[in-house]
Amino acid sequence: MTAETAHHPSGPLVLAFSLAGIAGFIDAHLFLYVTNVFVANMSGNMVRVGIFGGSGDWSIAAGSLAALFAFATGVVVAIAHHDRRLQQNKTVRPDELLVVEALLTLSLPMIVIVCDVEFSNQASPVHYLVIGVGALAMGLQASSLRRVGSIAVATTYGTGTIVRIGEKVALGLRGAERTSVGRRSATVIVLVGVLACYVGGAAAASALGSAPLLLLIPSAILLAFVVYIRSSPGFRAAYAESRTRRAERRTTDY
């Protein structure tokens, strides 16, 4: 059996910041200009399901339910991909997931343009297609990068990140003893940076407007990172940490 932590790929800070910005951009663009459903922020979708389900507006709540299902599917596919490689005693390859995410993201403006998708708060079949593709891509991304060094990160949502920032700040002010190797200040800086990039991406989507071709920007960034990752020993070494953690866990178990 592989340790669960082995399925948490580690990568550089610049990748975490970029992925968070991409998530914020796509989330905001689709929410503002396609339909009021989040494809990255699943906490928001759960609230929407509760609000509209409670009032009986299931036709509106269904869009958020579709996003939740597609996002979860993306996570399952990504973790299965990691586990298959680990079972074969190979290094995890999150860059392969980023390729799929880039292709899915690339298809979004094509769908919107070809199908002449207009904004609607009540999703139609083509809106569900956009929601499904976007949320599936974000689910893959959520499992493509889980750590920056020893610091756990989440590039597609912020609630848990805010809780962790508050925890580190409170314990630091109290002078509590650290149980981990990393400094609390470094953790706070990384987490705040990830949140800022997510918000910045959303702000950029709002400021740039509704043109579907703007969705080519995150696709181009993702593909550029994939090219760089595959040619950079440093990136590959960072991703290889998952296999190292697995080997250490197996040694401890025996």
Image (cartoon, rainbow, N blue to C red):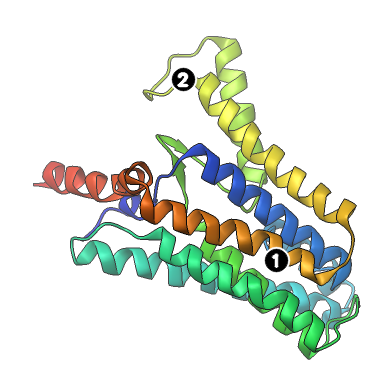
The answer to whether 252 is drawn above or below residue 223 in the figure is: above
Q: Indicate which disc, 1 or 2, sits on the residue closer to the N terminus.
A: 2
Query: Mark 1 belongs to which amino acid?
Result: Leu
Name the residue beneath numbered marker 1.
216
At numbered mark 1, what does the secondary structure look like: helix, strand or loop? Answer: helix
Q: Quadrant of residue 70?
A: bottom right
Q: Residues within 10 Å of mark 2 (few under 14, many from 20)?
A: few
- Residue at 38 percent across and 45 percent down: it is 235
Specify the farthest residue to the top: 175
- How many numbered markers are drawn? 2
Q: Amino acid at mark 2?
A: Arg
Which residue appears at 56% of the width and 65% of the height?
A: 139
Q: Which residue is mark 2?
A: 183
Classify 2 as above or below 200: below
Measuring from the top left, give residue 8's x and y in whole percent.
39, 51
Left or right: 143, with 24 as reference point: left
Q: Nearer the viewer, residue 78 or 51?
A: 78
Judged left or right of residue 88, residue 41 is right
Question: Could you tell me if residue 57 is visible in this image?
Answer: yes
Quarter holding residue 42? bottom right
Q: Quadrant of the N terminus?
A: bottom left
Say which residue appears at 74% left-offset and 60% top-offset.
27
Residue 38 visible to an observer of this rendering: no
* Image location (x, y in percent) of residue 116: 86, 86
Kindly report the distance in space between the C-alpha atoms of the residues bearing marks 1 and 2.
Answer: 37 Å
